Every structure is written in structure tokens, then in C-alpha cells.
Image: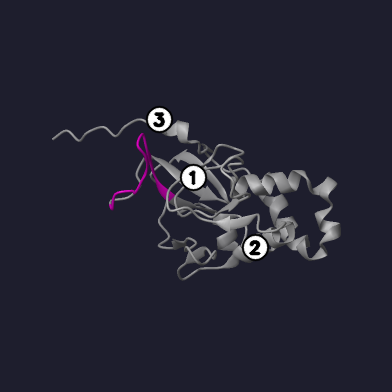
Amino acid sequence: MRKGLRVFALLGKAAPSGLIPFPREGAGQSWAVTAEYGCLRLELLAGDEEYTGLKLLLPASGDHAYGVSGVSESSELVRAVFGLLPAELEELVAVLGRGDFPVISRSPTAAQCSISGMLIPAGWPHLVLSNSAAYRGVVSVETFVKILVSSLPQGQLGTRFPGLQETIRQMIKLSISRVPGIPCHPEIFNLVPAEKPLIK
């Protein structure tokens, strides 16, 4: 969707029962889960947002690629929605990888970030830090990027891995960007007002 210069993804309508699809007639004034710069937010749409006709491509079970499809697809558009390009995220994971983890993953159902508690919608890319249930190692891309950026001075990633300079620059941009709405926690769905029935 587009509003002025802002471009963001509309993932679904927030309802007390969870995330549901929007009806065909459009978003209108409703609470929605949106994605911008890799941040998942709950925000109240004004009803004047414009549909772009572009569609999200989420990871498949055997492929971690994601993106935006349509006439005006571009790497900057993918960054505007997901935060990092698939190749950048894969490069980070490969550099940080110790053994088999972390890995980029997706879930057929909604998941919860083990660090921030944020809701990760079904199909949305995230990271798995461990296959042990004791560690509950599911982490959203937003949280992963924030932790890496906060540890850059001590970890010296830029010095140890000069090839990551451009990706690190993108991560720093993400960490200082201001995204509308509030972080999307599962508990917040309980506070979303139910739809009023139509009176004929």
C-alpha cells in the first residue's frame, strides 16, 4: 500500500480472534498488521491509503527467498517492506552461523518472537536460533537486526567481515527508522474492538 511517499505491506486485519484477511471492498478504517522496513506493527488505517496492486512473495518451505512482485518491483521496494534483501539476510546468517544455527525459516502458523514477544504472522520470514524447545529460539528479523546493530562496536563485524559493510549500513538505517503503529504483540489483539454488526 502507499500513503504519500510511504510504501508498506498490508498483512491482514487485526481482530480479537487474531489476524484475518481484509474483505474485497478494502481496508477502510480498521486496525491492521502492517510491515515496513522489516518491522511488524499494529496500526489504525485512515481509509485513504492507496492499493498499489503489488503482491508479497513469502518464503516457501524449500526456499527462503521473499520479495515484492509487480510492475515496479525493485530491491529498494523489498527493503521498504522486509528491511533486508534475502541475499543480505542469508549473508548475515552464514557469517554468524555456528554449526546449523541460526537459520532463516517460516512457519505455517503465527509464531511469537522469543526475545521481543512480537507476533510473527504465518509465512513471514524469521530466524530460528535453536531446535531445542528449552531455548525457544524463534526471533523476528526486526529483533535480530536491533541486537546485531547494538552489538556492532563490541563484535566488530564490519572489521572482521569487510564484505558486510553494505548490509551493516542497511541494518543501521533500519534501527533508526521510525515506523508508525505499535509493536504487534499477541495480547494486543484482545484489545482490538470487535466489528460492529451492520444494521439494516
Q: Would you place residue 139 above or below residue 157 in this image? A: above
- Residue shown at the point (48%, 39%) measured from the top left: 42
The spot of residue 156 in percent (x, y) is 84, 52
Contact, mark 2 vs mark 1 (Cβ under 8 Å) = no
Q: Is residue 175 left or right of residue 49?
A: right
- The kind of residue on which mark 2 rests is Glu
C-alpha gap between disc 3 and disc 2:
35 Å
> Which residue is labeled 2 in the image?
90
Corner quadrant of residue 54: bottom left
Residue sitting nearer the eye, 184 or 70: 184
Q: Earlier in the sequence, mark 3 or mark 2?
A: 2
- Quadrant assignment for the N terminus: bottom left
Q: Which residue is mark 1?
A: 111
Q: Position of residue 43 (x, y in %)?
A: 47, 39
Q: Which residue is mark 3?
A: 190
The disc at residue 195 is none
User: Which element is circle 1 on?
Assistant: strand
Q: Secondary structure at mark 2?
A: helix
- The image position of residue 148, as x and y in percent, is 73, 48
Q: Nearer the viewer, residue 128 or 178?
A: 128
Q: Which residues are magenta?
A: 11-24
View extreme (right): residue? 159
Q: Please, is residue 81 above or below residue 143 in the view?
A: below
Type of amino acid at the residue the image marks with label 1: Ala
Query: Measuring 46% from the left and 36% from the top, which residue is drawn there?
Result: 186
The magenta stretch spans residue 47: no
Task: Please report contact status of discs 3 and 2: CB closer than 8 Å, yes or no.
Answer: no
